[in-house]
Image: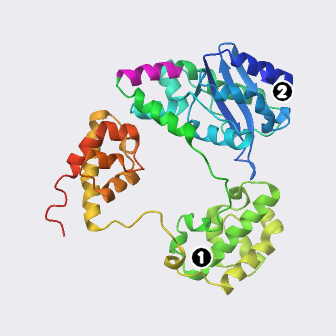
Amino acid sequence: MRIEREAELRALAKDLLREKVIAVDTEADSFYHYFDKTCLVQIASSEGIFLVDPIALGGPSELAPLAPVFASKRIRKIFHAAEYDLFVLKRDCGFEFANLFDTMISAQLLGYPSVGLAALVERHFQVKLPKDEQRSDWSARPLREKQQTYAAADVTYLISLATKLEALLEEQGRLAWAHEEFETLIARTWPVREFDGAGYLRIKSAKSLPPTQLAILRELYLLRDARAREVDRPPFKVLGNRTLLEIAEHQPRTLSELGQLKGITELILRRLGKEILEAVIRGKELPHEPLQRIEGSGRRRLDRRTERRVERLKRWRTSRSRDLGLDPGVLCPNTQLEAIAWRNPARIEEVAEIPELKAWFVREFGSEIVDALRGVDDGAD
């Protein structure tokens, strides 16, 4: 059922407050717009499936009647890969959340090799979900019938799937791990997204460019973002990263030279050609500073002692992950292994003081970590 009017939304919210469990998903338009927004909220309950249309309602802020539903500690909310859904709903609507269950996190903690929703539904219900609308423009109206079918399918099996996964987590003694992961996700906050003027350094191969080419890449990156904002399109749909690198490497001087480069169409030449050539000139006039003078790194370089600890911890993780049937990165990501190695804990209390570690990991494996590190520094330089 489509929810497109305020009265319909208020009636739905009232009905949902009587539910014990609901399934939720969202669709946004980040693939089509620079300024992305929540375009659809799908909700499944015991009464059916509802497609709540923020655009028809006047915008995401009009979803306010749903706030008590999401904040209710009594109503369980089932999501799959909830991180992005929570991000957009908190950002666009200011919602708070309680009593959440994430089927993707659950599948990861169960050691499933494939944790996408389609894979889980096929595994547990022998049903293939539709995939042909994954790249739809969810901001366009009216929604096509196939879009509505696709959107509804994303919540059709979530409640039943969560029931199955919860039982398996409890059977394997990992349900408490999952609940702690869910609470961490609920508590997460996201800073306001701002344009990162140094983002060009994260383009593959950018750091290997000589100073002049890197300066040109910087100017092109800034130009691309400005134009993307102006036309409300994702930056990659204005100019792709590969095209930015092509221009920086070849440094075209004329529109004719620019037009010979891979990724440059007639449309780009007409709309951006002159500005691109001006960006090339700016980059040539002011070569890039050495990267070591302008880059900061959030991760410290490992010294030899710490490297040895990390290697010992990785051997422990490989063995323990195999025993548990878990992906090593789910058990303990590399960043957390490095945090442990830097601290080099000799007691479980010291493991618990490492802020990067999750409570369930410390509780279940803290003593093993201490044992794994014992003696690793003996005879070290």
Residue drawn at (35%, 45%), measured in percent from left and top? 352
Q: Which mark is residue 267?
A: none
Q: What's under tag 1, amino acid-wise?
A: Leu
Residue farthest to the bottom, as pictured: 285
Q: Which mark is residue 214?
A: 1
Q: Quadrant of residue 39?
A: top right
Query: Which of the two residues, 316 or 350, is positioned nearer the viewer here?
Result: 350
Pinpoint residue 309: horizontal percent, then vertical percent: 26, 57
Give the overall secondary structure of the magenta segment: helix
Q: What's under tag 2, amino acid-wise?
A: Glu
The number of numbered badges drawn on the structure is 2
Q: Residues within 10 Å of mark 1 (few under 14, many from 20)?
A: many
| Residue identified by numbered label 2 | 4
Please state, as top left, top right, bottom left or bottom right, where the C terminus lies in the image: bottom left
Residue drawn at (63%, 37%), measured in percent from left and top? 85
Residue drawn at (69%, 13%), measured in percent from left and top? 47
Pinpoint residue 215: horizontal percent, then vertical percent: 63, 78
Whether residue 112 is visible: no
Q: Quadrant of residue 272?
A: bottom right
In this picture, which residue range is highlighted in magenta? Answer: 161-171
Give the structural element (helix, strand or loop) at label 1.
helix
